Amino acid sequence: MEEMMRYGIVGVGMMGREHVANLAHLRSEGVVLTCIADPHPPSLDLTLDLARSLGLPSPQVVEAAKQRPEILVQVGLEYRYMPPVAKLIKVVKSGTLGHVKMVAIREHRFPFLVKVNNWNRFNINSGGTLVEKCCHFFDLMRLFAGANPVRVMASGAIDVNHKDEVYDGKVPDIIDNAYVIVEFDNGSRGMLDLCMFAEGSRNEQEISVVGDIGKGEAFVPESIVRVGMRKTGRDGVTTIKPEDERIKYDGLHHGSSYLEHLNFLAAIRGQGSSGPPVNLHDGLLSVAIGVAGQLSIEKGCFVTIEEVVSMTKTKSI
Ligand SMILES: NC(=O)c1ccc[n+]([C@@H]2O[C@H](COP(=O)([O-])OP(=O)(O)OC[C@H]3O[C@@H](n4cnc5c(N)ncnc54)[C@H](O)[C@@H]3O)[C@@H](O)[C@H]2O)c1
């Protein structure tokens, strides 16, 4: 019999609870939640309610949480697993588009949700919008470009959202729109177009990858991928509707965190590639691009990734 895989979750707010729900749907994979930790009693209560509604043995969870606070570390860049994004990654990696030259990602969506103690309203807590929210897109840019970032130039501001909010006498300082340009070490470039007051959008994410022989696009949540070649032009563009039958729980991210868990389990059990599918280096660089973007907005000039990474090293010393 396969060994049970025991999970601990630190922080059971909105995202932590999405993981709890995913784990409930992964019971047949030999998964059990043994520990949760959170200093905010309402988060614990909501999680226990959720666990009960999903039939998870939540009294045992609390007991286990007290006794064995073990933690599993995983970088949660689950946008890679959204079916249309995963399909586009496959198309790009197959070489169909040739050498990738440009990656444009547009996220046009609703404003930031309200979070526990409103931590996400201030750069000091989250690192800023380009770090907290956009690390996913910078991770995807790296994947599509097949390269590492060199420098970042960004322009952004808080123009519409949160201006009438006040917390302990302070008005939020997080940006709600930005353009970010990322240059990679193989000569390719990425561009993020972020707008968080764009509820009137059909899609939340529109991704375009252009190589020297073709172009691929992915649309979320329409879940559509389009692929076309320069040779065959507009008439040759094909539309694919990718689906993943393995998904048993859609959650808030179109089933991607469910697939992320499946991949993680496979990696732990030695059934996948070596190590977690998204490793700490991937996580570090996705965040470093976000930090460089935030700094670039402040300074009004390009910021190198080297500068950001060396700042981190200096701080940790
Ligand atoms: N991967 C994604 O797509 C995605 C989506 C949403 C949020 N997130 C990330 O997930 C994290 C949590 O976001 P959320 O939406 O769940 O926020 P949230 O405010 O809903 O929940 C955060 C929880 O963490 C708890 N917490 C704070 N400090 C803690 C500590 N020291 N030990 C244990 N628990 C602690 C809080 O009490 C709260 O219950 C953030 O880093 C956010 O950027 C990721």
Image (cartoon, helix red, strand yellow):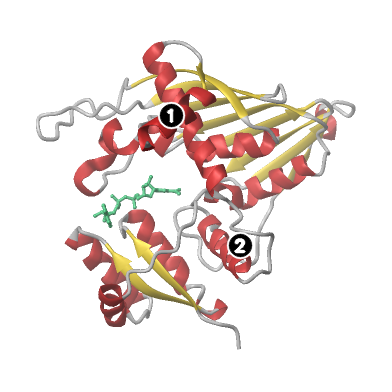
- Out of 175 and 293, give the one closest to the viewer: 293
Q: Are marks 2 and 1 in contact (CB under 8 Å)?
A: no
The residue sitting at the top extreme is 300
Q: Residue at x 31, y 78 (%)?
A: 64
When the figure is inspected, residue 65 is found, relative to residue 211, above or below; the finding is below
Q: Position of residue 62 (x, y in %)?
A: 26, 76
| Residue identified by numbered label 1 | 291
Q: Quadrant of residue 184?
A: top right
Earlier residue among tags 2 and 1: 2
Q: Residue at x 34, y 55 (%)?
A: 14
Q: Residue at x 56, y 43 (%)?
A: 282
- Out of 275 and 41, give the one closest to the viewer: 275
Q: Does any portion of residue 111 appear in the rendered image?
A: no
When the figure is inspected, residue 251 is found, relative to residue 218, above or below; the finding is below
Q: Does any portion of residue 286 appear in the rendered image?
A: yes
Badge 1 amino acid: Val
Q: How far apart in space, not on screen, are marks 2 and 1 (Cα)?
A: 28 Å
Mark 2 Cβ and ligand 1 under 8 Å apart: no
- Classify residue 103 as left or right of residue 153: right
- Classify residue 125 as left or right of residue 299: left
At numbered mark 1, what does the secondary structure look like: helix, strand or loop?
A: helix
When the figure is inspected, residue 50 is found, relative to residue 119, above or below; the finding is below
At numbered mark 2, what does the secondary structure look like: helix, strand or loop?
A: helix
- Classify residue 48 as left or right of residue 276: left
- Out of 300 and 307, give the one closest to the viewer: 307
Q: Quadrant of the N terminus?
A: bottom right
Comparing labels 2 and 1, the label whose residue is closer to the camera: 1
Q: Quadrant of the C terminus?
A: top left
| Residue identified by numbered label 2 | 263
